Image (tube, rainbow, N blue to C red):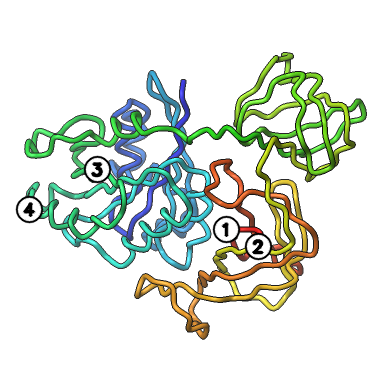
Amino acid sequence: MELRRFYTAGEVDDGKSTLIGRLFLDVGLIYQDQLTAMDGNLAHFTDGLREERAKGITMDVAYRFFETPTHKFIVADAPGHLQYIRHMVTAASLSDAAVILVDATRGVSTQTKRHAWIAQWLGVKSIVFVINKMDSADYSQENYQQIKGELAHVPDATFIPASALKGDNILHASKNMPWYTGPSLMTWLQDNPNTTRHSSIRFTVQNVLGDNSILGKLVAGQIKSEAQLQSTAGKIKIEEIHQYPHTKNSAQAGESLRLKISGAALQRGDLIFDQGLSSSQSWQADWLLFEKTTAPLLARTQTWEAQVTHLHVKNVWDWEGQGWISDLSQKTLPWLQKGLIQFSRNLHNDPFLHGTNMGQMILIDSQTGKTVGAVLLRKGS
């Protein structure tokens, strides 16, 4: 059974929570007593915070899980406001696909364009625009085509006219829009390809045991027992592959493993690889800052951490003009910037979008411990 991860994004009242509620209702995972408890409001299925309901907005990411006969799904209902962008970044970085809602009665907004750009910036591989509330737009094909035309600049995007409230084109094709011959949202989600596997081997070491064994995750490629590989500490040989409670001859990307090895002595934070790994203390990068801080910053991946010794900003992203500019005097958070980031020690990694699910990190305020930014590595310098 294949796993799909997707997140929803959109403006307030575009219907994100209602859409997720409709998906769960139509696949049979919301029962009548639950629907009654929600006063028939499907949006309450994902609204978990009282303050959120009171304000009528989604402030945090609500995660839900469901299955069809052929697939498992993890869906994240992400907030749409720019000030809550950290939550959208979290949801998008873990997703294979973005489901961006557009209110058919209001059309494309600046927020819609931001959501689409953020999804592309974060490397989300598949994007679908659900033109929602078509029932309130008299199921107008002209209305749908106009919105589709305004978003035609988003490469390889899919467009689905729908009504989350009525169920049109969510699970099944809508009889109210015979002019639309594309997939329903559920069909698109099931047919949407999963994360592309990469041939390069990348194994992150998360713990070292006393019997020449290491614990970690294979984030890219395929490994086999008896394989001779490189590591950031030197050459190693994989003697055995274990995934509790079994011993295996091989393993695929995405699996958490215990490896018995010989050769170099590894420690937490090391990487096992076969080829092409970049190594540098200085990286060309983009970074998104959620909060302003004067405290020293720490950069952290899943297994590596170092102080940020310098951030040299070359350009900033203009959220209104949707382009990179050289005016560095922006005052409104969040700040999306590009330039050179330098660390207190060497970082072995891949550029973002290299195909190995690496090249990402977070920035942490060293005084408060709060996550204040996200980084996409572009090239070791």
Left or right of 251 in this view: 120: left
Quarter placement of the C terminus: bottom right
Residue 164 disc label: 3
Label 1 to label 4, Cα distance in Å? 41 Å
Q: Nearer the viewer, mark 1 or mark 4?
A: 1
Front-lying residue, 191 or 71: 191
Q: Amino acid at mark 1?
A: Arg
- Please rate how many residues cluster around mark 4, counting C-alpha atoms within 10 Å: few if below 14, some from 14 to 19, many from 20: few
Left or right of 172 in this view: 58: right
- Please rate how many residues cluster around mark 2, counting C-alpha atoms within 10 Å: few if below 14, some from 14 to 19, many from 20: many
Q: Which residue is mark 1?
A: 378
Q: Amino acid at mark 2?
A: Trp
First-in-chain label (2 vs 1)? 2
Badge 1 vs badge 4, beta-carbon distance below 8 Å: no
Q: Nearer the viewer, mark 2 or mark 4?
A: 2
First-in-chain label (2 vs 4)? 4
Label 3 to label 4, Cα distance in Å? 20 Å
Residue 283 disc label: 2
Left or right of 97 in this view: 93: right
- Please rate how many residues cluster around mark 1, counting C-alpha atoms within 10 Å: few if below 14, some from 14 to 19, many from 20: many
- Please rate how many residues cluster around mark 3, counting C-alpha atoms within 10 Å: few if below 14, some from 14 to 19, many from 20: many
Please, what secondary structure does the residue beneath circle 3 have?
A: loop
Left or right of 54 in this view: 182: left
Q: Amino acid at mark 4?
A: Glu
